[in-house]
Image (cartoon, grey):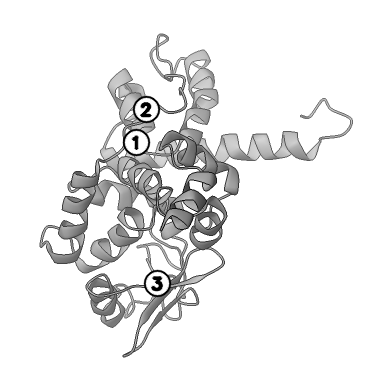
């Protein structure tokens, strides 16, 4: 980029994504207690399997690390093939929902976050960036704004959020005197790291498999445009899931007419 007369916006965004994903990757390694020099193929496979497909961008950092003799020379990312990622089955999703709503393995904060992933197909990266401007907890209802619509959480999905609102954590420390973050991190003024939350939920379910399974099932129930607007996804993303689940918009309309 330093040799270019003019840096295009696309080139800038690509460079920014490369750095952001590399930082996330290094944070993930640190959370796992893995030094860069100890990196193995199994670690790369786990990193890719547990997150969005953009994690493959870490290959750019990996190539630099290989060239700089910081990691083994034979390490490579596995190229992603669309449609091959594992999805939770409907039965597995039901079990995960029960664990989030009624289980004791997760704390209140993690149960609240888990509901957004399992029931509404939210990416962890989006969940940790929620603020209390996006969430409202009243005696009458609990609402969360994920896309363009405020979603009302019906019982019993609302209870973990009611419990969490009473004691969100880090609210009485100097690090977060007036923080609007819903999921507050341990660093002053910062939200919880996505990698940290993902690791905590891993004992109950794979967040990526849960999210993909949810989107797969939701496309059988409603039009692509409605799902995209409600959950904050692009229509193209939801359309891909709709095609994969053999539930296109035309099928939905046909079902309505038959009813």
Q: Residues within 10 Å of mark 3 (few under 14, many from 20)?
A: some
Give the image location of residue 61, x and y in percent: 52, 26
Establish if 101 lies above or below 258: below
Secondary structure, mark 2, is helix
Q: Residue at x 21, y 68 (%)?
A: 108
Q: Which mark is residue 36?
A: 2
Establish if 106 lies above or below 15: below
Picture quarter with the C terminus = bottom left
Q: Earlier in the sequence, mark 2 or mark 1?
A: 1
In the rendered structure, are the residues bearing label 2 and label 1 in contact, judged by CB atoms less than 8 Å apart?
Answer: yes
Q: Earlier in the sequence, mark 2 or mark 3?
A: 2
**Which residue is under mark 3?**
175
**Which residue is under mark 1?**
29
Q: Is residue 238 visible?
A: no
Q: Residue at x 43, y 37 (%)?
A: 246
> From the viewer's perspective, is 140 left or right of 92?
right
Q: Residue at x 31, y 48 (%)?
A: 198
């Amino acid at each position: 980029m330093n040799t270019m007369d003019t840096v295009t916006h696309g080139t800038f965004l690509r460079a920014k994504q490369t750095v952001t994903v590399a930082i996330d990757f290094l944070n993930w390694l640190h959370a796992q207690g893995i030094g860069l020099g100890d990196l193995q193929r199994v670690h790369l496979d786990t990193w890719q399997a547990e997150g969005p497909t953009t994690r493959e961008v870490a290959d750019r950092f990996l190539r630099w690390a290989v060239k700089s003799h910081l990691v083994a020379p034979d390490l490579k990312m596995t190229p992603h093939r669309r449609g091959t990622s594992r999805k939770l089955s409907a039965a597995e999703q039901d079990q995960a929902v029960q664990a989030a709503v009624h289980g004791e393995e997760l704390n209140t904060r993690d149960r609240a976050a888990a509901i957004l992933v399992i029931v509404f197909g939210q990416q962890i990266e989006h969940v940790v960036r929620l603020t209390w401007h996006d969430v409202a907890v009243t005696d009458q209802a609990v609402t969360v704004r994920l896309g363009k619509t405020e979603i009302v959480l019906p019982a019993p999905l609302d209870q973990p959020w009611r419990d969490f609102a009473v004691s969100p954590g880090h609210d009485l420390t100097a690090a977060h005197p007036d923080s609007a973050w819903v999921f507050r991190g341990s660093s002053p003024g910062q939200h919880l790291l996505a990698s940290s939350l993902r690791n905590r939920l891993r004992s109950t379910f794979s967040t990526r498999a849960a999210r993909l399974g949810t989107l797969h099932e939701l496309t059988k129930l409603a039009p692509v445009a409605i799902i995209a607007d409600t959950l904050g996804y692009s229509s193209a993303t939801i359309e891909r899931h709709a095609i994969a689940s053999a539930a296109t918009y035309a099928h939905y309309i046909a079902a309505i007419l038959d009813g």
